[in-house]
Image (cartoon, helix red, strand yellow):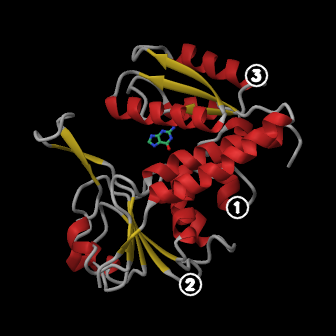
Amino acid sequence: MAAKIIDGKQVAAEMQAELKAEVAQLRQEGIVPGLGVILVGEDPASQSYVTAKERACAELGIYSDDNRLPANITQKDLIALINKMNADPKINGILVQLPLPKHLNEGEVLIAISPDKDVDGFHPTNIGKMVAGQPAFLPCTPHGVIKLLQRNGVKIEGAHVVIVGRSNIVGKPIANMLIQKSKDGNATVTVCHTKTKDLAHHTRQADIIIAAAGRPNTITADMVKDGVVVIDVGVNRIKDASKKSGFRLTGDVDFEKVKEKASLITPVPGGVGPMTITMLLYNTVESAKRAAGKI
Ligand code: GUN
C-alpha cells in the first residue's frame, strides 16, 4: 500500500484562515491578541523558527513584540524582561524559544512566565493541569499532532499509539494527552526511548507511530506494520552541498520506504512543523479571549 501523504501545510492553512477570521472579529471589538517573543543567541534553526512564528502573527493580525537578546544575557535580565511582559496587558502570550544557552537555567525561566500567558504550555502549572485532565494551554507540537490526526480522519480512540522519544516538549506531553479520558484521547500508549529494548518489537505493534527521537532513520520499513499511520516530528539538518543553505531537512523516519507500507504519513518538512506554529497562534488567541473575559 502506498501511503496518502498528510499535508500539514494544508491543515495549518485551513486552521490559520479560521483564526484570521476570528482575530478580525476580535479586533472589531477592540481586542488585539499579542505575543511576546524572546530569542536568546544566534542559533540558526531557532532564528528561522522565531521568524516564521512572527511572520505568521503578522499574517493573522496578531501583534508580536520581538526581542532578540545576546547569547550572554544574564538570568536576571532575562527574567526581568519576562516579568515586564507578564505585567503588559498588550501581551497575551510569551514565547521563549528553546533551547537556551547552557549558562541559563531553563526550568527557572519557564516558571517565571505567568501560567496565564504560557502559550507554549511548558509551565509546571499547565503541565499539571494537562496531566490531571483540566483545561490548560496545551503544548503546541503535541496539540498540532492531534489536530493533524483528527483532520485527516484518523481514529485515536482505542488505537495503539507508539511514541518514540520522551522529551518534555513532545514525547511526555503527547503521551499524557493521548491517554486522557476525552474526545482527543482514549488511546493505548507505549512510550519508547533510548533505553528501550527491541524498539522494533514495539513499533511493529503500533496503529499509529509518533517519531520524536531527533535522529534520522530511527523508524525504518522493517519496523512498521502494513497500514500504520506515521507522524514524523523529527527535524534533522543533514549536510547537502547541492542546497544553497548547505543542508536539507529530514525527519526521524525513512520516509521513502516507510510510505510504501503506511496508510498515512507526514513528510518533513511540510508535516508537523506548520502545525506547531498554528497551535501557538491558537493558544495566543485563546489567551486574548480569556483576558477579555470572553471564555
Ligand atoms: N524549541 C523547539 N520547539 C519549541 C517550541 O514549541 N516552543 C519553544 N518555545 N521552543 C521550542
Residue 158 disc label: 2
Which three-letter amino acid code belongs to the residue tagged 3?
Answer: Ala
Q: CA distance from mark 1 to mark 2?
A: 20 Å
Q: Secondary structure at mark 1?
A: helix
Asked if labels 3 and 1 touch by Cβ distance under 8 angstroms, the answer is: no
> From the viewer's perspective, is residue 120 above or below residue 154?
above
Q: Out of 121 and 276, give the one closest to the viewer.
A: 276
Among the two numbered marks 3 and 2 on one chain, the one whose residue lies closer to the N terminus: 3
N-term-proximal mark, 1 vs 3: 3
Q: Residue at x 72, y 47 (%)?
A: 21
Residue 168 visible in the shown view: no
Coordinates of residue 152 in the picture (x, y in percent): 52, 72
In front of the other: 101 or 295: 295
Q: Nearer the viewer, residue 205 or 290?
A: 290
User: Badge 3 local density, few (<14 within 10 Å), some, or many (20+)?
Assistant: few
Residue 87: mark in rendering = 3
Residue at numbered disc 1 = 132
